[in-house]
Amino acid sequence: MSSTATQQMVNKYNAFSEYPINILNTMFENVAEGIMITNNEKKIIGVNPAFEFVTGFRSDEVVGKSPSVLQSGAHEISFYKKMWKCIDEKGFWQGEIWNRRKTGDIYPEWLSIIAVKDDWGKVTNYCGIFTDLSERKIVESELERRALTDTLTDVCNRFAYMDRMNALLEASSSLANPIQHAVYLMNLDRFKHVNDTLGHAVGDKLLIEIARRIKKLLKNKDILARYGGDEFVITLTNIAYTREAAKFAEEVIRIVEAPIIIDGHEIFVSTSVGVSLYPLDATDTEELVNRADKAMSFSKQNGPSGFAFYIDDLDIDTKRVLLLDTEIRKAIEHRDFNLVFQPKVCINTNTIIGVEALVRWQNDKLGNVSPAEFIPYAEETGLIIPISEIIIEKACEALTIMHEQDLTNIPISINISSIHFQQQYFLDSILKILEKNNMSAQNIEIEVTERTVMNNAVETVNKFVRLKELGFKLSMDDFGTGYSSLSYLVRFPLDILKIDRSFIQHICSLEEKQAIVDAIIQMSHRLKMKVVAEGVESLQQVELLKKMGCDYIQGFFYSKPLPLDELFEFLELWEQEHQGR
């Protein structure tokens, strides 16, 4: 803590001396934080009821004793020496510390200690104020556990895979002797057919069995993760020869092809596998997976039940990519991107509480280009930054028109690419756009993905805090896809959490999905965040989400994404239909 900040904190506590003693006594007795006061010899002379509640010690059990009665043994002597040195030099210390309750249980708390001095600068007392962090730690631990494992197959999820791979590659790069790893991205052939004909419950059991079979092939240091719906990623570590990687791919294909009996049905599936090699094809995790994905797509084009290694010539649609690059640059120059808006509805009041802006691109040569095609390419090439700025500008223009129609209470949420967010000038660029359009930040909600919060946590926190100070609302989009650590929810000042549509899709038919959604809603509310359910398509889903306590609904059940003029018509009809209800 800086000397200025320390002095401000000291001044804040000293200012309490101006209040009448009865007010101070009332505060002392009723605040939720535990308070301990010692004399200048560090002997306890008073504690408040919150202290007794948290620690389990009565006042008469600790008065006259040293605060060391609470020590847990979790910290070295050097920790306490450093703490008291800070108090002696600056008059204040704060930080996380582990103490012990009367029951013997140790617990974490956020502790602030201030030295109270008389008019001559002599220390007369010490005051410790603390907050019990136990519940927050429990929530964080549970979130962390959920973050690392795919709940269906009990293998790593995407985030855990990326984390383990990054650690593996970092260790591998520092070795004196070169080491080689193989990355496999596998996609099940005919999986959609199984889901469509036998149901998603059977499909889930199929995925569980596939994961179980693959695990039998792996060594201790190998990595298996469910990467997406019916995709698995595998890292075979420390391979000696390329033919070893090929042999393993053949083994995976063979065990997947073996018949599987589920609920009396004999099911046959196959898999297409793409392989990339470290360090031959790439030296970082994302690029290794990306190149394995390209190889898998190539294998799939050549028919099911096969594998392919990545080669540099796997630019499957080079002509379209070149045309896409040319046209997307022209579209940026002429601001040819358009926005559509999907309403978000309060599940309890049936009011429209905001809309999400979604980008669309119609091109003369490429036709209606899906965001799923041009957004990833724009992120890969860095063109996402000017596109993102155009989207923000067009959202401000839409807000201006909405305000002219007296629609001043409907904010627009905007998806911000992690690449744009991580730019050093991101805050400056978004503020310039708002200033140019004379638009308040309070009319805009910034949506970021789990990938955004995973990168450079310290800088991300600083940007989030600054955005909040400016008046923006902050939400995490597509939550639950398993990319980032859920403990970040505790650390970042998010207002809203949006549950990914992949969880919402089957909540009425799969108890596991219900349990996950319910847990996310409850934990979000405990962390003081509102929850939006994305991809809601049926009344049954709405009713179940309402029962779970979900705050807001977004999806085709209420409306598809609409151009601005059609949004106005929708809002007018909505108002007429729900007026007086």
Image: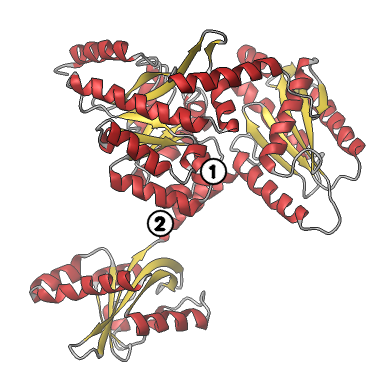
Provide residue 469's location: percent of width, then percent of height: 29, 48
| Vertical arrangement, residue 456 with respect to residue 22, above or below | above
* Circle 2 SS class: helix
Q: Quadrant of residue 296?
A: top right
Whether residue 351 is visible here, answered yes or no, is: no
* Circle 1 SS class: loop
Whether residue 446 is visible here, answered yes or no, is: yes
**Label annotation for residue 120:** none
Q: Quadrant of residue 193?
A: top right
User: What type is the residue that disc 2 sits on?
Assistant: Glu
Query: Label 1 crowding class (10 Å Cα cut-off): few <14, some 14-19, many 20+?
Result: many
Provide residue 338's location: percent of width, then percent of height: 41, 17
Residue under numbered circle 1: 484
Query: Label 2 crowding class (10 Å Cα cut-off): few <14, some 14-19, many 20+?
Result: few
**Label annotation for residue 135:** 2
| Vertical arrangement, residue 390 with respect to residue 242, above or below | above
User: What type is the residue that disc 1 sits on?
Assistant: Ser
Quadrant of the frame with the C terminus:
top left
Q: Are marks 1 and 2 in contact (CB under 8 Å)?
A: no
User: Residue at image x 40%, y 56%?
Assistant: 135
Provide residue 219's location: percent of width, then percent of height: 81, 46
Q: Nearer the viewer, residue 115 or 516?
A: 115
